[in-house]
Image: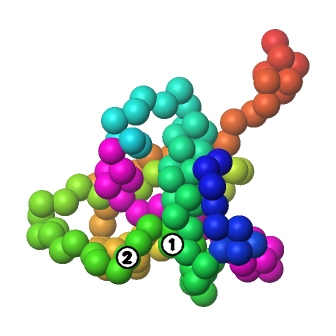
C-alpha cells in the first residue's frame, strides 16, 4: 500500500472495529486513469489497486454512514449528468456467499446515487482456497 495518513488510518480502523459489517464505496473508478487502463489478473488484484489509490488520499474526517457504508471517493464536487447518458455498473466483492449482502449493496448504491435502477451488476463470488480445490480432485 502507498503512504497513508496514519492518523486517518487509525481513526478509520477504530470506527470499523465497532461494526458487525461494513461496505466500501469507492466511487467511479473511471475517474482514475491508472485503474481504468490496466488489465488486472483477478478481481482481488483490481480491488487492492482501487483501495490503494483511495487509501493514499484518506481523509482523517472520513465518515461511516449509519448503514455501514464507508464512502472513499470525494463527493465534494459531484458531477451532474442526465440519467439517460449514464450507465451505472455496480461491482460487488463478496467474502461469503449471501444474497442478502447483494441486495443490501444494490439498495445502498441506489440510495447513494439517488437513482431507481442500475444497468449492470457484476458479482465477484468468494473463492475457495487452493487446498479445498485439491481435496475435491
Between 113 and 7, the one nearer to me in the picture: 7
- In the rendered image, which residue does mark 1 sit on? 71
Q: Is residue 17 left or right of residue 11?
A: right
**Residue 97 at x, y = what percent?**
67, 50
Which residue is depicted at the point 41% across and 63% down? 27
Q: Residue furthest bottom?
A: 66
**Residue 120 at x, y = what percent?**
34, 51
Numbered disc 1: secondary structure:
strand
Indicate yes or no whether the magenta region holds residue 123: no
Which residue is depicted at the point 36% across and 59% down? 28
- In the rendered image, which residue does mark 2 sit on? 75
Which residue is depicted at the point 48% across and 31% down? 40
Q: Which residues are drawn in magenta?
A: 11-33
**Residue 127 at x, y = what percent?**
69, 36
Q: Are marks 2 and 1 in contact (CB under 8 Å)?
A: yes
Label 1: few (<14), some or many (≥20) within 10 Å? Answer: some
Numbered disc 2: secondary structure:
loop
Q: Is residue 131 left or right of residue 118?
A: right
Between 51 and 122, the one nearer to me in the picture: 51
**Residue 72 at x, y = what percent?**
51, 68
Amino acid at each position: 500500500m502507498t503512504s497513508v495518513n496514519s492518523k486517518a488510518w487509525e481513526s478509520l480502523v477504530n470506527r470499523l472495529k465497532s461494526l458487525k459489517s461494513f461496505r466500501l464505496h469507492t466511487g467511479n473508478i473511471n475517474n482514475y486513469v491508472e485503474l481504468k487502463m490496466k488489465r488486472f489478473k483477478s478481481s482481488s488484484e483490481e480491488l487492492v489497486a482501487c483501495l490503494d489509490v483511495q487509501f493514499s488520499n484518506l481523509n482523517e474526517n472520513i465518515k461511516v454512514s449509519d448503514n455501514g457504508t464507508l464512502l472513499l471517493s470525494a463527493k465534494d464536487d459531484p458531477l451532474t449528468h442526465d440519467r439517460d447518458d449514464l450507465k451505472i455498473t455496480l461491482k460487488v466483492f463478496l467474502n461469503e456467499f449471501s444474497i442478502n449482502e447483494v441486495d443490501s449493496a444494490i439498495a445502498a448504491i441506489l440510495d447513494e446515487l439517488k437513482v431507481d435502477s442500475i444497468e449492470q451488476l457484476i458479482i465477484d463470488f468468494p473463492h475457495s482456497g487452493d487446498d479445498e480445490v485439491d481435496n475435491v480432485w
